Every structure is written in C-alpha cells, then in structure tokens.
Image (cartoon, rainbow, N blue to C red):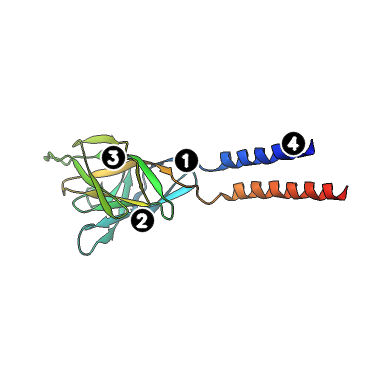
Amino acid sequence: MKYVTLRNAVLGLGAVLMLAGPANALTYTFTGSGGNLGTSATFMDGGVSVEVTAVKDFRGANPTTADIRQNSDGIGVARPPSGPSVGTDEALKFDWSPLTVVLLSAVIFEKDRPNTDKVADLDLWVDGVFNQNIVGPADGEFTVSGLNLSGTYFHFVGNTDQGNFRIKEIQVRLTRNPVPEPSSMLLLGTGLAGFGMWRWRKSQK
C-alpha cells in the first residue's frame, strides 16, 4: 500500500511539473507606447525571452545597428521623423538563441506613405539564410500564417524605401523545453526531499 501511495505521489509530482512549465506555443505582442527602445529590446512570453535588434544596411558590406521604435501598431526601425518604419535593407532581428523555435505566424502592419502606392514588401531570413519574400497590402494589418520555419533567429528585411512596416505580433513553438523555472525546481526538490524522508523512516522500522 505504501508503494502504491509513493508511486501516485511521484506521478502527481511529475504532472504538476509539466503543468508548471511554459506553454509550448508562445505569442509575443510588440505593441505599446515605449517610443524609442534603443538598439535592442527583450520581450517575454511564458518565461521565454526573445531579443529584438534593429539593423540598417542588412545586406550591405557594413551593416550597422539602428534604434527600435514602438507604438500601437508594433515595432519598427526608427527613421525620424516618420517614426517606426523599415525601409530598404533595414531589418528587425528576432533571436531566441540558444533555443530553437518554430516560427508559426507573424502579424505585420503596413502604413503607406502619402502620395505613394507601395505595398508591404519584405524578405524573411532564417538563421542568416534567405527563406522567402512576403508581400502584403499597402495600408493596414495582415497576417502571415502557416510558416512552420525552424530556427534560432529570424530577420524581417525591408525591400522598399517607401515601406513603413511594423511587426505587431509573432507566434512560435518551442522545439525543446527551456531551463526549468526556479519555482519548478523548488517543487521538484521538495518532492525528492519527501521521498528521501519516506525511505529513511522505512529503513528505521
């Protein structure tokens, strides 16, 4: 009977640890009123962080860092005075290293400039390699879904100097679990300590 009780306790502990871990699917929302966020910014979901950096002249000989600007439509590369925008060869990098994730979808906002008829036109790079071109409407929000691209970091790169796109939301799926959170480790330690106490008491009988 004691064995059955102990087994149930161990199984219950495992179930609690699984529930305490971060969700497998993560959704990062980049909207806000932060203004200029500097050359890099970190966003969190489910205890897993992604570092975003801004790059100018991404495909050139000498890429340089740029500032990220945030507003209610998402984040983009700062290009004063127009605010959040991504022009030709300006990029946003989303880096989950050392984790590997599967990029599922992205919500992109395109704000067309006055007197232009440019559509959203950007390239998606995975781990430093070109993957695909993305084209969207000239003005408004659109979703790119069904990507299922595995990688550690991703670049969204602008292809037109009239473009003004912003990344509003990204959804990814983890391909392996991150390091357990401190609360999960404490729970595991408590369970192991209880198991050790039970074994000790049994040996004294």
Q: Residue at x 23, y 40 (%)?
A: 110
Q: Residue 18 appears at what percent x and percent y?
A: 57, 41
Q: Earlier in the sequence, mark 4 or mark 3?
A: 4
Residue occupying the point 56% across, 49% down: 181
| Mark 3, residue position | 108
Which residue corresponds to mark 4?
4
Mark with earlier residue (3, 2): 2
Read off the residue under disc 2. Answer: 40
Indicate the position of residue 52 as horizontal and vertical percent values.
Answer: 36, 52
Helix, strand or loop for disc 2: strand
Image spot of residue 12 (x, y percent): 66, 37
Could you give the CA–CA distance between mark 3 and mark 2, rounded to whole angstroms?
19 Å
Residue tagged 1: 24
Mark 3 / mark 1, whichever is N-terminal: 1
Instruction: Identify the residue at image location x=33%, y=47%.
Output: 70
* Residue 185, numbered circle: none
**Badge 1 amino acid:** Asn
In which quadrant of the rendered image does the N terminus lie? top right
Q: Amino acid at mark 2?
A: Ser
